[in-house]
Image (cartoon, rainbow, N blue to C red):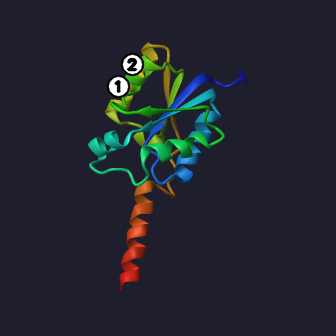
Amino acid sequence: MDDKEYGTGLVMGVFDLFHVGHLNLIRRAKEHCDYLRVGVLSDELVQKFKGHAPVIPQDERMEIIRAVRYVDDVVLIDDNPSRLLEYSRRPFDCYFSGDDYIGNPYFEMEREKLREKGSDLVFLPYTQTTSTTKIVRRIQQVQEERQK
């Protein structure tokens, strides 16, 4: 171990239109753990939860995440993005999330249950300047401007 707080860490997400906010989350998570696993939500799961498919297909999103130097392992999350379910499959010492989920009742419940199992849930600073939603909106603006 490298004197980090955690052995195995986990981050999960869609990671569509990979951007600096994604990179910041992954880099910050790796600063706290020796081994970082990243779960990429499947196309089908994203469709189910967000009501639309991701722009970038899951295999390509996984390949992009694999190429990030802070990532030690990439897994596909294809049925349920529950941190508790993922812990039962592939245990981890800490789950890392953006701090935009602080106060979310579901995350707080999972945090308590993970702690009962000896794991943790840590919130890291959310990158305010960019998000996939902001990128999509900007693309739409540019397209509208070009049509004028």
Q: What is the x, y in percent for residue 115?
A: 45, 18
Residue at 39% across, 65% down: 137
Q: Is 20 placed above or below 120 here?
A: below
Q: Residue furthest front?
A: 59
Q: Circle 1 sits on which residue?
A: 109
Left or right position of 18 against 57:
right
Residue at 52% across, 30% down: 10
**Which quadrant does the C terminus fall into?**
bottom left
Picture quarter containing residue 37?
Answer: top right
Q: Is 3 placed above or below 73 here?
A: above
Name the residue type under label 2: Lys
Residue 113's disc number: 2
Q: What is the x, y in percent for residue 41?
A: 40, 38
Q: Spatial distance from mark 2 to mark 1, Cα to Cα?
A: 6 Å
Q: What is the x, y in percent for residue 128?
A: 50, 54
Label 2 packing within 10 angstroms: few (<14), some (14-19), many (20+): some
Residue at 53% across, 50% down: 21
- Which element carries disc 2, helix, strand or loop? helix
Q: What is the x, y in percent for residue 117?
A: 45, 13
Residue at 60% across, 39% down: 28
Image marks 2 and 1: residues in contact by CB distance under 8 Å: yes
